[in-house]
Amino acid sequence: MAVNTMTKLTLGPIAYHWSADARRDFYARIADEAPVDEVYLGEVICSKRAPFHEADLPATIERLERAGKTVILSTLAEVMLKRERKATEDLAAMDTPEIEVNNAAGLYARGKRPHRIGPFMNAYNDATIAWMAGQGATHVCLPAEMPAPAIAAAAQAAVALGLGVEVQVFGRASLAVSARCYHARAHGRTKDNCQFVCEEDPDGMPLRTRDDRPILRVNGIQTLSESYVDLLPEAAHLIADGVTHLRLMPQAVDMVAVAQVFRDALDGRVPTGEADARLATLIGHAGLSNGFYHGTAGYRRISAAAPA
Amino acid sequence: MSLAELICPAGTPAALRTAVDAGADAVYCGFQDATNARNFPGLNFTPDELAEAVTYAHARGTKVLLALNTYPPAGKVDLWRHAADTGARLGVDAFIVADMGVADYIARTYPGIRLHLSVQAAASSPEATRYYCENFGVKRVVLPRILTIPEIRQLRREIPCEIETFIFGNHGLMVEGRCSLTNYLTGQSTNMDGVCSPASDVEYVRDADGSMSSQLAGFTIDRFGVDEKAGYPTICKGRYAAPHRPEGYYAFEEPISLNLSRLLPELIEAGVHAFKIEGRQRSKSYVRGVVRAFRAAVDDIKAGREANIADLIALTEGQKQTQGAFETKKWR
């Protein structure tokens, strides 16, 4: 890979219900050891979980900023209940740190003050990105299911408007959200009396087909891909097409090591093939996929594009 | 009292005429391409067919709503713009949109034509709805099927536009416009291509023990015993195994239809302006039966008469039906 030291590595918000302790330890290591430039914090999936870890936010922000990371707070993907509307409004009212908006309710509350567009906002095209830029967006994270030609066209438009452009390059892809909690359902409960059973599955609850093939992961109201997206072999193409930020989604694997693999490859210290092999070792049993990027079924793994 | 308009599906020109004749206040339809969320083979309209449909509907006092409710991927936005241009030229009464870029284009180019916010935009709060109303002049929001009646009643007080809710038909489980399950398994996107669990990827496979597997793109979405009727492999209505459910269960929802007949009076009272019947992929006779029954029920309620709810219940007799989120939040 050509040397891409300018490309920023970001760490997306934790999608799962990790305990407050686990989060503190996780972000302490990220602050001290992970070569990521920007870190997204905040509860994006389930508003019921926020009270468990939001008290730690100020300390986590301080810790990460002290380590030289840019911190961004992400808003909820689904906003329906009073507490969700309030949480969104409160975040949108903040001047620092930066805000990533994941629901139109957040856009409404934010007005024309600067903000980032999150992956749940469906910024699929140049017209939408231009509209959002006119409303104060400074940065856009594209939806995980976009194929390469659309990413290139969207990135070109965004860069021309002076926006940062981000694509998820690692971790499970978010495939759906719902008003219903599927974790609670699996345990014969409802969302209101879930007893936070989702905490049992720090990397999502696996679903298998009736002929025993892994297919999807459940995370509360969210459904995720079984495979981890891995666009490390495609990173050079993404960057050449105008993508400025590469997002790693936190999974229950050694994320410091994952970030190091990406940084080494981006900086040209480790050849792409070798870096990708390291990644496969790090994530163990989970499959890797890049199908969305290549315009085919998301779960598929298309072998490396021409070396860049 | 709300207008209680009946918004009816028109997957084909014949279904459109059927729905108009059966008493629809408005019909909704789309072109034969990715610009709408029912981009299924054999469905939808050519521009010429839409022109005839608009003439037919308008002559009978029925409105035509054009669904442009998918999300154009960058590089293909012109297809959506051209569809809007064609719809405007043919005199449709409203566009149903989800993408902000598409909404912005129509609001600027055709300020005289109504914009309805598609369920695909997933506006489930007053703030989200106001965002679209204030920025694009949206006149009506089609609500996600995730709100209870008290929540709808409250929402009604807080937004400056009309409310449309689904009342009958297929019951999707995921937040519309935020679902990539089909793309994950098949490579065709619900948001960008208007495709959901496409028939071209469906296979029914007889297993050695006589059971039947319904598959999508080679994934077993469900398996049925010899005595069971094999269902269509819609991903969110499949049976899967989880660590606590090794026997396999409907992880998301059972294959079930939405039928809000019993709640119709309450929904009208809550201030819902329009009721949407799902089913652009359905037959003429289905459309005729459902539209006639709901027409009679709405007219009865508006006239202060007791509606014959039994007829509406009978429409889904023998099938599983649900009131979904509308009745109780225990659904969640």
Image: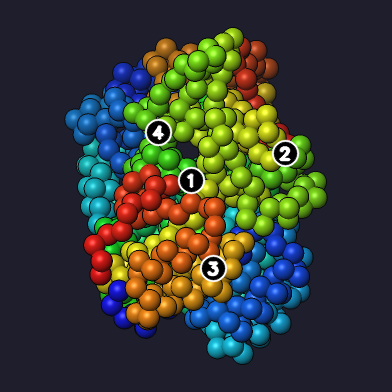
Q: CA distance from mark 3 to mark 2?
A: 29 Å
Report the side of B23 relative to A214 (left or right): left
Report the side of A285 relative to B196 (left or right): right
* Secondary element type, mark 4: loop
* Secondary element type, mark 1: loop
**In the rendered structure, which disc, 2 or 1, sits on the residue that comes first in sequence?**
1
The disc labelled 2 sits on which kind of residue? His
Q: CA distance from mark 1 to mark 3?
A: 20 Å
The disc labelled 4 sits on which kind of residue? Ala
Say which quadrant the N terminus of chain B sits in.
top right
Q: Position of residue A80 (x, y in %)?
A: 64, 53
**In the rendered structure, which disc, 2 or 4, sits on the residue that comes first in sequence?**
4
* Secondary element type, mark 3: loop
Q: Which residue position holds label 3?
A: A12
Tell me the mark number nearer the camera, choosing from 2 and 1: 2
The disc labelled 1 sits on which kind of residue? Cys
Q: Which residue position holds label 2?
A: B244
Q: CA distance from mark 4 to mark 3?
A: 31 Å
User: Do the residues at discs 2 and 4 belong to one chain?
Assistant: yes
State if disc 1 and disc 2 touch (CB < 8 Å): no
Q: Position of residue A59 (x, y in %)?
A: 71, 82
Q: Which mark is residue B217?
A: 4
Tell me the mark number nearer the camera, choosing from 3 and 2: 2
